[in-house]
Image (tube, coloured by chain):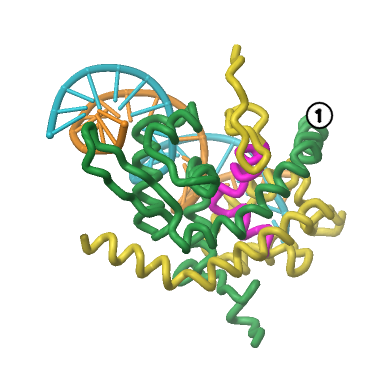
Chain colours: A yellow, B green, C cyan, D orange
Amino acid sequence: MDEERMILINGCSFSAENCPVRDVLGNVGGKWNTLMVQALAEKPMRFSALRRLIPDISQRMLTQTLRDLERDGYVERRVFPTKPPSVEYSLTPLGASFNAVLEPLVAWSAAHHAAIRDARARFDAA
Amino acid sequence: MDEERMILINGCSFSAENCPVRDVLGNVGGKWNTLMVQALAEKPMRFSALRRLIPDISQRMLTQTLRDLERDGYVERRVFPTKPPSVEYSLTPLGASFNAVLEPLVAWSAAHHAAIRDARARFDAA
DNA sequence: CAGTATCCGGGAGGATACTG
DNA sequence: CAGTATCCTCCCGGATACTG
């Protein structure tokens, strides 16, 4: 049992358990999660539309990523009993809220991409 | 300019190459990267101080994470030739800038952690 | 169309031991 | 103190094939 004292940073314990940062940002860790949120932030999309939008995702990972996001409440999945069936994915209010804080990060990435690539090149040169 | 062929989201092409989001957010993907940035945002810290702050990181991963962050220009490493040697890690301006956009994400995580855990529980029940 | 099912390789990351 | 150096395990994610 851990009775270690709580170290707080940004109001969040760094201990492994009950750490929101690890729990939530762990989701960001996935290769496709953030990309998917951004895609669905544009507009609700169907399975095949997402495949076309992100050409290099495998079918397996697309399904799995969507399931994960659905499980955590970011994404809603609606099935229309047409033939053949069509399924539409959309951001929930929670997902949209998440995308709102994700966007600045995306913008930052674009703005500083060059600086980071330069830093890498300099580091690797040494 | 929104073309159907060139699909842009948040001003970033979704194609694998030259995508800042994938390049930068890929770094976020690491298990310890964001945690380390947050830690160093508090104040510059030495190697052993970081170990104590994040108890469950392995020596190997601490070194590797710091190297990665240094390589990308987020972190500066300063060695003081004392005996035994001491090394201080601090955020660069780039790193601090990154932390600024990371903080809202951290705050969001804390604020919605309960909601996400609830969503998971509900999903798993079904 | 929107998925499962299965197999598989590579890399992330942990444990341990050693060092200047 | 601040690291290297190995070894090893797990699981992420790709490839492929099959289905309602």
Q: Is residue A30 magenta?
A: yes
Closer to us: B28 or A123: A123
Q: Residue A51: x, y in percent?
A: 62, 63
Which stretch did the figure color magenta? A20-38
Query: Residue under mark 1: which chain is it in?
Result: B
Q: Quadrant of residue A34?
A: bottom right
Circle 1 sits in a helix, a strand or a loop, which is it?
Answer: helix
Residue farthest toward the bottom in the current orientation of the protein: B1
Q: Quadrant of the C terminus of chain A?
A: bottom left
Q: Main secondary structure of the magenta part?
A: helix
Closer to us: B12 or C10: B12
Q: Is residue A33 left or right of residue A92?
A: left
Picture layout, residue B61 above or below residue A89:
above
User: Pointer 1: what residue?
Assistant: B125
Which three-letter amino acid code belongs to the residue tagged 1? Ala
Q: Residue B39: x, y in percent?
A: 52, 43
Label 1 Cα crowd, 10 Å radius (few <14 / some 14-19 / many 20+) = few
Picture layout, residue B56 above or below residue B14:
above
Q: Is residue A36 left or right of residue B35?
A: right
> Residue, x 62% and y 68% (percent of image)?
A53
Q: Residue B75: x, y in percent?
A: 41, 53
Q: Quadrant of the N terminus of chain A?
A: top right
Q: Is residue A34 magenta?
A: yes
